[in-house]
Structure formats: C-alpha cells, structure tokens
Amino acid sequence: MFSRDNWKEIFQTIQKNKLRTFLSGFTVALGIFIFVALFGLGNGLKNTFQEFFGNDATNVFYLYPGRTSMPYKGYKSGRTIEFDNSDIKDINKNFAMFLEYSTPRIQRQDTVRFMNESNSYATQGVAPSHQLAENTIMMKGRYLNDSDIMSKNKYAVIGRLVEEDLFRGKNALGKYIDIGGSAFKVIGVFQDDGGDDEERIIFMPYTTRQLIEMNNDKVGQLIVGFKPELGYEGAMAFDASLDKFLREKKYINPADENGIYIRNVAEQLKQNQQLAVVLQLIVSFVAFGTIIAGIIGISNIMVFVVKERTKELGIRKALGATPKSVIGTILLESIFITTVFGFIGMIIGVAVLSSLGETLEDYFIKNPYIDMPVAIFATIALIIFGGIAGYIPARRAAKIKPIVALRDE
Amino acid sequence: MIEIKDLHKSYKMGNNKLHVLKGLNFSIAEGELVAIMGSSGSGKSTLLNILGMLDELDEGSYTLDGVPIKNLNETKAAQYRNKFLGFVFQSFNLINYKSAMENVALPLYYQKVPRKEREEKALKYLGQVGLKEWADHLPNELSGGQKQRVAIARAMAAEPKVLLADEPTGALDSKTSYEVMDLIQKINDNGNTILVVTHEEDIAHMCKRIVHLKDGVIVEDKMVEQVRAEQYV
C-alpha cells in the first residue's frame, strides 16, 4: 500500500488536480489555523486573568483596622482601632501552628529626592517576610532582613521604576536618597509583575518608620501568611478564629462590620480558580467545535471528491483496480493532503500567535500561546478523524459497480 | 473461450421487473471476431457488461477460458478483469489528467508491473496503434479516433484473453470508424478474440460472425464474409 509506485500515482493525481487539492487543503489549514488561534487567544485571556489575581501570594490574609460602629463592653462606637507591635507577637504566639509568616505594613506617601530629581512615592514599612506576601522579585542588591529590623537601619529597597525615575538609568545601589527628610541608603532594587504601580514603591524596615514617627509602636496593617497545606477549609477556619481573637483583644463587637476587616485571598483565589475553570471550559468547547467542524469539512470534501472521481474510479475498476486499491488511493491522497496542509495551518497559527505577543493586551489578551503538544495533537486528531471520515465515501466508491460508475457523466 | 448457458438478467425498475436477457446460449472460440448486433434495448450492452464482469448475471452460467465466472467478490472480479479482459468503450473512458502513455500503462499498474517495464510496454502498444509520437499528450489534445486508438492500446496492454468493445465507433465519423475497425481487424489477425457490440450494419460486417439480439433473445447467429476495413481507409 505504501510502495513508491503508489505514492507516485498519488502525487500525480494531486499535481494534476490543483484546484481540488488547494480547496481541500485550504479547508484543513483554515480549520487548524482557527483552532490554534482561538486556543491561543483563550490562553491569552487566561493569562490576563491570572495576572489580575495571581501575582501575589494566595495563602495570605490582609488585616485592616477600622473604626468601630457599635458600642461594646463599655466602649463607645466610633473608636479608631490600631494595630501595634504586641498584636504581631500575640498572633505569632497563638496561631503558630497555622502561620507561615506575618508582617506589618505601614503605608505612607513621601516625597523622595535624589540629586535634583524628586517625586512622590508610596513607602511601606515592612518586615522581611513581606517579600513572600507580595512576590517581590529582587533585581539587584537584597531585600530587608531581620537585622535591619532590629537595628532600625535607614535602608530602602526601591522599585524598578523608582530607580528609573530618580536615577535616570544609573545604578541606585549604595546611593543615598532623601525620603520625607531622612537619608536612606538604597540596598536593593526590585521588580513586581503586578504592574507599574507596584514598581513605584519603596520598602523600609517598619521599625525605622516607627522610629521616625516619634518611636511609636503602631504597625498600620497586618499581613498574615498561613501554611498552604491548610487548604481552603483550613484557611476559612483560621480566618474566623483570627477575627474572633482580635475582636476579643481589641474589644470590638463581634457583629461590628467596621472595627476590623480581614481580606482573605484564599476566598478570592477560589473564585479566581472557578473563573479559570470556566474559561478553560469555554476554550476547550470552542476548540472541540472547531475540530468537529474541520472533520465535517473534510468529510464533505471527501464526498465531493469521490463524487467527482466516480467515473475515473469506474475506469480504474474496469481496468482491474481492486476495491482495496480504490480505497487506498483515495485515503492516502486525503491523508497526505490533510497532513501537509494541517501542519501548514498549524505552523501559521503558531507563528501568528507568537507574533501577536502583547499587542492585544488592551483587549485583555496577553501573550497568547498554544502548547506545541496540544497543537500537534489537534492536527493529528484532525488527520485521523479526517481519514476515518474519508474512509466511508471511499468504501462506498469502491463498492459502486463499475458499470454504474462508468455511466456517470 | 467464452461459454454461455441459459443466461438470464433482469433489472428492477421500481416495482416492475425488466427482463432484459431471456436465456441466451452461445459460445465463442479463441481467435473469433464476433459482432453483437441489435437495436437499443435489445440487451446487447447488458450482455457485454456481464461478459466483462462489470455486471452480474441472475441465472445461467458463464465460463471464461475454462474458469467459471460466478459469485465473484469485487476483488476477485477486478483481478479477473485485469487478467482476462480488455475494454474499449464508446466514450473512450480515458483518464483526462493522464497522458496517452500513462493511460495505456494503467492496467499494468494494477498488474503490479514495475514502472520502467510498464512504460516500455505502453510505448510498444502505442506504437502498434500508430500513436508513439503522441505518448505525452493528454486525451483532450487528441482527436476522437486517436482517443479510441489509445483506448485500444490500453485494452491490449494487459494482454487480455478477450477484447470487449462496446460501440467502439459510436462516437466517430465513418472514416475514423473504418480506421478503428481496421485496427481491430489487425489485432484479430494476430489471433486475439474480440467481441464488438454495435448497431451499425457495416461495422458488423467487418467482423467474422454476427450474433443478432432482439428483445433479449438471440434471433440470428451467422458466420459472414468479412469486409476488410483497409479498403476504405
């Protein structure tokens, strides 16, 4: 069936019937191309969603103090709640078995100067483990460490864009910058996938911030990272007991919605994951549909091809072509065309996707891509099912009596 | 060579059964040139199709070169056609995207003859019908008579036991018809058995024997004095 002679026969048929070859090839190539493009764009959409939610650590609670709106245990409503150093210690002590890390975050807005350049930036007084909560990536230098916290060093870790703005492309490491009137040494430059705003931040030890603000012990927000193995249920339980503990300690009415607020990323993550699953489903559905449409397309072409060739097949049968050789000729030809054009469509699709890159970011499609195994699998699936779809009309053609086929005009 | 006994064939036309061949008996010896004559609807093409294994008989028996032709599956029928029979059709039935030489070589392809040998043989037979220099031309570049000669070369290429021609001159003018008949006579002179279906009296008389069909029965089976086509060419 696969002798050189057979292939010569098939190549000749393909060459001498260019329009037919082109039409069927075009359909196949277009089918695979659309599949690859859609699948890639779907992945791009998923990338964007992941970027929205997924850039920070997900095993994290953000604890925000507020202002009470209910009286409780003799305290009036309207009382401002603040976290202080003792809260960190208490949480670390009481929830050690759930906790991976905890860090305060004292957020301020400061004018920052270097030489003649100045700008207003968000500064955050944090502990070293804050790096884990925000997935901060160090480009050069280092992040804050425990000894910086202990010694209340005037060290600053600045965002990539801060360096770009103030230092005009020069190296900021080891230089001194003026933050709100105090000189800080730049010990590190970081980048963050969360977007430009996340790279216009300056980190300093929270103890240094407290020192500057008249040596107080207030810590602004608290960020608590829990052990990922807790899972969703464990995280929700931890959330509840942490809330209860802090309300008791701070004398906040358990029903008061404004005294304290815990932002639970685990819950957001769950919704995010559900969204991703839905997106994945839609993408798979569309992809599946495209492949089905492609297979139907090939089947149609095969029916047409067989119809068009009925007389020729009749002649061949009169000259001694066996049913097997008739089926073989038609199938090999269609599989050959499907394979060649399928891979052409696939390569064009992949090329288009990779050339798109970030140009569609405004439409929430970022870095569209398709995994090569998926693309190749889809192409092979189309070839195989196309072959099966082609087999049916081929077999029917082989069964037509030569006398009937010869009468066909 | 060909032995037919009590051959019946009918077609279903909706609810009606059309009895086309009603019990034919005849035999053809090796080297004969037989014309099957009859008006349209007499069953002559049906008979040829059955002889050519393009169609199946309902009743009776058909023996070709000592081999009973009965209950053949498609594969077997294809092999027998390839081995025993050569076809010449009224409408030539050349494959239009293949050159004359490739058309002639096609039956040899199904005999699994190697490519080189195939082409040599095809050229040899094209030479015998006088079309060697037209080997690379496509059918649509040939005249009707040339097409039929290519078809005859193709039928001969497989070196069949019997050559079956269905109205070989039906689509040709009389001059070209005589050329084709001349060729058929010469092939017969070399000892090949040939069956020609025709409704033209003059073409029939260029054969050696005429079998007259009417309404599905043989009404006449006679030897005739062969008219050589050469004199008209």
Image (tube, grey):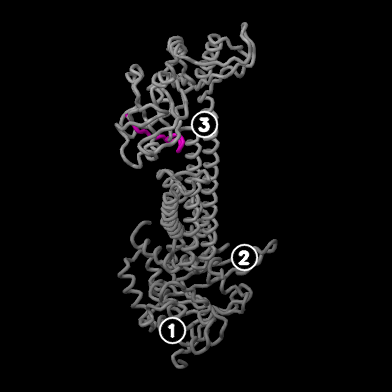
Of pointers 2 and 1, the one earlier in the residue sequence: 2
Q: What x and y, as percent, mark residue B93?
A: 49, 73
> Magenta region: which residues?
A187-199
Q: Is residue B66 visible?
A: no
Same-chain status of marks 3 and 2:
no
CA gap, disc 3 to disc 1?
Answer: 85 Å
Q: For this rendering, which residue is in front, A266 or A35? A: A266
Q: For mark 2, does the 10 Å Cα neighbourhood hold few (<14), some (14 to 19), or many (20 or more) residues?
A: some
Q: For mark 3, does the 10 Å Cα neighbourhood hold few (<14), some (14 to 19), or many (20 or more) residues?
A: some
Q: Which residue is mark 3?
A: A273
Q: For this rendering, which residue is in front, B192 or B136? A: B136
Q: For this rendering, which residue is in front, B175 or B203? A: B175
Q: Is residue B9 magenta?
A: no
Q: Which residue is mark 2?
A: B10
In this view, A296 is above or below A215: below
Q: Which residue is mark 1?
A: B185
